[in-house]
Amino acid sequence: MTADYQPNRFDGKKAGRVILLLCMAIALVLGGVAWLLGSYRQHVRQPPMSSLESQRVLPPEPRLQANPRLAGEQQIARQRLQLDSYGWVDRTQGIVHLPLEQARQLLLERGWPTPEEVVHGH
């Protein structure tokens, strides 16, 4: 060993104090940040929305379907309802829709209209 070498003695008490001070400093900084954010949130708090603001506004067309399968099933149900029911297509011209089976039966009984009947509307 040389004369200028001196072994470093590790002092556990000093290291513990340094770690404790660092932890306290970190906790103090985090507490300060939390306090600042809390006071900012209270300061910036917005008033409650009016009934007009809380209404849902739909985006412009075309809209994406949230559930395309359900939308397709609903469309098929609407079409099937029209195929199986009576209703006006154009009341002023006397055009109606009727159940598909009845339309087939009438077509069998009366036959297809001739071109003259179609043109004259008989």
Image: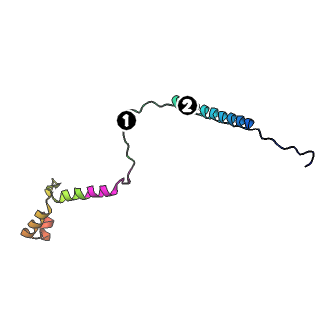
Residue 5 located within the stretch drawn in magenta: no
Which is in the foreground here, disc 2 or disc 1? 2
Q: Is residue 33 left or right of residue 97?
A: right
Asked if residue 118 is positioned above or below residue 9 in the image, the reply reads below
Q: CA distance from mark 2 to mark 1?
A: 27 Å
Q: Position of residue 30 (x, y in %)?
A: 61, 35
Amino acid under label 1? Answer: Leu
Residue 66 located within the stretch drawn in magenta: yes
Amino acid under label 2? Answer: Tyr
Q: Is residue 79 left or right of residue 3?
A: left
Q: Between 101 and 46, which is closer to the camera in this rendering?
A: 46
> Mark 1 falls on what kind of element?
helix
What residue is pinned by disc 2? 40
Would you identify the image quadrant in which residue 88 lies? Answer: bottom left
Residue at 38% from the left image edge and 54% from the top image edge: 64
Q: Position of residue 43 (x, y in %)?
A: 53, 28
